[in-house]
Amino acid sequence: MDADEYDDAYDFWLFDLDGTLVDAEWSYTREVFDRVGDRLGRAFTDREAEVIWHGLGGARDPQLRAWGIDPEEFWPAFHAVEDPAARAEATYLHDDAAALVSELVAGGVPVGVVTHCQAFLADPVVEHLDVGDWFDSFVSCTADTGWKPDPTPVRHAIEGLGIDPANPGRGVLAGDGASDVGAAWNAGLDGIHVERHSPTHRGHCVLADHRVSTFDELSQETLGLDVAADGGVASDD
């Protein structure tokens, strides 16, 4: 699919970062949760670490509370044990995401990021992967901006593209979680869910305007063509 075809489909694109454009090696994730567990006096299973790291169960704070963990204790411990340089070294680009964003950038389509990853962690990742030039806008959510699915950080990212968030035109936000799609819809954008984990593994399906297992499947979706009969791509209209 040519970049100008993407341009025909959407005026601009926003992406989640972790799990959507990039991911960290499991060994790094496991080490982080071991260290958090040491601080909290509570060990985390592989499944628990995966659920929180990838947000498999949806919003993370309710999941932590369901396990008897106070989010106000968990998150300071989590951020205290993370090493920005080590995380950057352990982070890799998803090939399908790199191909998509590269084509968008080559076609002159505005591209931005809205991520829950804090700036002190996200900035070294972007620098290490040498992708800073890809993004015209980059927003790390905070308590002040709000957290997805709150549309406020999305509107900040749209503004950073030089577009009026009150009248954004046809834009899209792509992410790997329900909060990404919710933020897109709340901001008046289309939402794309890239399912890096199967619904069975996640424990539920995520509704979206477009659902794909890889961005390579988006060619038909973005152009509004019929979905392939094999069910590899689904559209919720």
Image: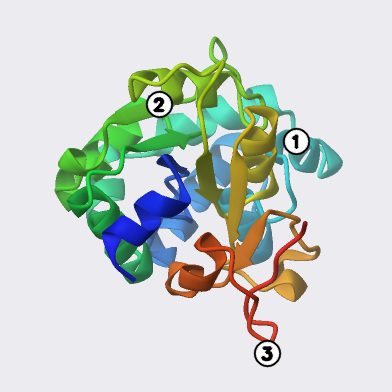
Q: Position of residue 160 (x, y in %)?
A: 35, 20
Q: Which mark is residue 69?
A: 1
Q: Nearer the viewer, mark 1 or mark 3?
A: 3
| Distance from the alpha carbon under mark 2 to that under mark 3 | 36 Å
The three-letter code of the residue at mark 1 reads Ile
Image quarter for residue 192? bottom right
Residue 93 in sight: no
Q: Position of residue 8 (x, y in %)?
A: 41, 52
The residue at 70%/83% (across/down) is: 231
The C terminus, quarter of image: bottom right
Local secondary structure at mark 1: loop
Determine which residue is flagged by label 2.
139
The three-letter code of the residue at mark 2 reads Val
The three-letter code of the residue at mark 3 reads Asp
Image quarter for residue 230? bottom right
User: As drawn, is 237 to the left or to the right of 216?
Assistant: right
Local secondary structure at mark 2: strand
Determine which residue is flagged by label 3.
230
User: As drawn, is 138 to the left or to the right of 65?
Assistant: left
In primary-sequence order, the first of circles 1 and 3 is 1
Image quarter for residue 39? top right
In primary-sequence order, the first of circles 2 and 3 is 2
Binning the other alpha carbons within 10 Å of mark 1 as few (below 14), some (14 to 19) or many (20 upward) gives some
In this rendered view, identify the residue nearer to me: 65 or 57.
Answer: 57
Instruction: Say above or below: 191 vs 221.
Output: above
Local secondary structure at mark 3: loop
The residue at 42%/27% (across/down) is: 140
Q: Nearer the viewer, mark 2 or mark 3?
A: 3
The N terminus, quarter of image: bottom left
